[in-house]
Amino acid sequence: MLVNQFLILAAGLFALGVYGLLVRRNIVLILLSVELMLNAVNINLIAFEAMIRSSDAVGQVFAIFVITVAAAEVGIGLAIVLMIFRNRKSANVDDMSLMRW
Amino acid sequence: MTFAEWLSEPANWVFAVLGVLVLASGFRVVTARNVVHAALFLVAALGGSAALFLLLSAEFVAWVLVLVYIGAVIVLFLFGIMITRAPTGYDKTLDADRKLWPAALSVIMFVTLAWASIDAFGARVVADLGEPTTTETIGLSLLGRFVIPFEVVSFVLLAALIGGVTIARRDLEPAEEEQRRAV
């Protein structure tokens, strides 16, 4: 297996995440796109670890760190979404123009 | 390496199937017209990447991905979708009207990344995989060389826990507060 096939797959997944981030208007769907991008990064880390095979599995340890931070991000993100929804009765980012001039 | 040589390796067939699955469900995540469907397609994309991790002999990370993402994060997302009463049927306000520039930007990003990785790694192959990485190796690494990042990440999780509860908690109205204090 080439390293490139994994890197190009991850690049495709990352580009899809960027597209979703820019196009979606619902906050929950934007967070889903961010998860897609973080997962692409994980594929890269695991592929590089399989390429270099370090003695203490550096790539896999960092993938675990990325997964942990992503879980924290989703928890906080959804708490903020709930708060905004409670105050403004909408989950659409176009409605959140309070701090825009 | 020619394409015929690439095809002669059985692991590459598995990769091709999983890659198509991951990319197709990733595409549906960002295009699905139904919010719940988008979350469920993310399950397929993450399951496919967990299988790719198994292919790359990263067994522990693959199961962590299944447990944390498919087990916990997706459930959290479904809760978020239901609590915000996002329209679960077809809804045209889910997407922006103009899609040309985002599409062009993501295509440019993909081409740049793909070109850079082909330029940098050319025909380098994944090293002879042999034995999968054991959980023992990862555990020793986490509590040895990476013990400080490990503790920092645990602190991040604690902060996220407290922050999530504080942000999502509904503040009581002054009258309610008074009533509660009187009891």
Image (cartoon, helix red, strand yellow):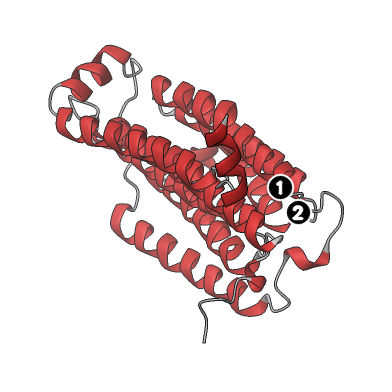
Residue B81 drawn at (x, y percent): 70, 45
The numbered mark 2 sits on a residue in which chain?
B
Secondary structure type for disc 1: helix
Nearest the camera: B6 or B39?
B39
Label 1 CA crowd tier, 10 Å (few <14, some 14–19, many 20+): many
**Up/down of A77 relative to B79, above or below:** below
Residue A28 drawn at (x, y percent): 63, 52
Residue B12 showing in the rendered view: no
Mark 2 — residue? B32
For the point 72% across and 58% down, the residue is: B31
**Up/down of B18 relative to B61, above or below:** below
Q: Quadrant of the C terminus of chain B?
A: top right
For the point 49% across and 52% down, the residue is: A37
Under mark 2, the amino acid is Ala
Label 2 CA crowd tier, 10 Å (few <14, some 14–19, many 20+): some
Residue B165 drawn at (x, y percent): 48, 38
For the point 41% across and 29% down, the residue is: B56
- Numbered tag placed on residue B38 in the rendering: 1
Nearest the camera: A90 or B121?
A90
